[in-house]
Image: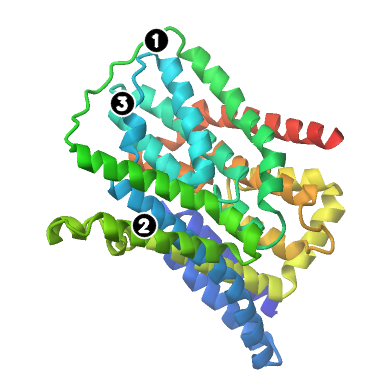
Amino acid sequence: MFIFFLIAVFVIGYIAIAFEHPLRLNKAASAMITGVLCWTIYMFSSASAETVTDELLHHLGEIASILFFLLGAMTIVELIDTHNGFEFITRHITTRSKSRLLIIVVVITFFLSALLDNLTTAIVMASLCARLLKNKEDKLWFCGMIVISANAGGAWSPLGDVTTTMLWIGGQITALNIMKQLILPSLVVCALPLALVAWRFRGQQIDRLEEKDDQTKAEKKDGLLILFSGIGFLVFVPVFKTLTHLPPFMGMLLALGLMWVITTFLHKDKEPEQLEKLTVARALQKVDSPSILFFLGILLAVSSLQSAGLLQTGASWLSNTLGNDYMIGSFLGLLSAVVDNVPLVAASQGMYDLQTYPTDHPFWEFLALTTGTGGSAIIIGSAAGVAVMGIEKIDFMWYLRNISWLALIGFAGGIAVFLLQMQF
């Protein structure tokens, strides 16, 4: 009976998360309530409260490593944005050709999302397009491509997508191998839709918005220093893990600490009013805390299903029904367009252990690709899509009519390239 209640609470919580906007209830609240209730039901069903507590604390240790990693990364990106470091990119885009501008924006998004993360990059690039473009329809097409390229760019990097980060921290993949195996399929996921949309814009010119440059020379210099320092430290995190074998969040905390030192010395002579806006403490205040709490709640809920043995049952059902690793991965990838990919990957980590699929097994690489890029098929299927939808007020049905089929072509192309790679 308790299994029925556990599944019911999880499903209801999931529905509340999916209908966040109609309910006008932040998904963090739904996730936290779901996580606590799932563990409460599991506790009442267990014969030993001590065993359940030990299991909870074990899972919490793994979850905390993901949350601290995300908190550090988000703070560094917020610091770059506060110092207008991303303005360096916009100042160097001068083309007036729509197709050329689209290619530049998509390429920058693809590689930047691998260094920062797909959500942050989508916000930065959508804001950039809002500054560069006047026409509303142009903005919608550009933002649709930003969603696809941000998710594709995030899939092949351990820093680029929460799900890839989770697999990396969980020991299912290693940093260099995932980059080597997924860079080409991810490029194809992005390149196929880009070619079609760039062809649509061929020969068209842009009415660009004129930007005001009100930054001083010193401010530009500070922004550039923070931009390259931040990106450099983020790239250093996988290197730190490889050298020390410590968990990735330790490298991220070191990176944040070093950024704190740099900003302290950089602004030591500034006035208190000006200094307050540029500190790490202010960046921490501006970090998207509800997203951190959402991840905490949903990962707690999924871990309760794992402890109850439900995920292992689900794995057996999928294996018996689909019978093929790549069919399972493709199914989970398409499902991630409807269901948030964070709990999907967390569930997969619980369903399939490292004895079944050892570190760097093609199943984990394929899962990172499909769950990272499948969410582009629907605008609410990824955090990047939801963020861009909010910035440009993109209509759900407009995206479904114009962008979804492009995302699915890229998704299928990426899978085909990955399978070809496996053959050779």
Relative horizontal placement of residue 91, taking residue 254 as reference (left or right) = left
| Dot 3 or dot 1, earlier in sequence | 3
Q: Residue sitting at 65 percent across and 92 percent down?
A: 50
Determine the secondary structure under disc 2.
loop
Image position of 91 with respect to 50: above or below: above
The residue wearing badge 1 is 204
Residue 24 bears which disc, if any? 2
| Dot 1 or dot 2, earlier in sequence | 2
Q: Is residue 295 visible?
A: no
Amino acid type for the residue under numbered disc 2: Arg
Determine the secondary structure under disc 3.
helix
Provide residue 173's location: percent of width, then percent of height. 71, 54
Question: For the residues carrying marks 3 and 2, which lies nearer the camera in this image?
Answer: 3
Provide residue 215's location: percent of width, then percent of height. 19, 37
Amino acid type for the residue under numbered disc 1: Gln
Question: For the residues carrying marks 3 and 1, which lies nearer the camera in this image?
Answer: 3
Q: Residue sitting at 79 percent across and 47 percent down?
A: 362
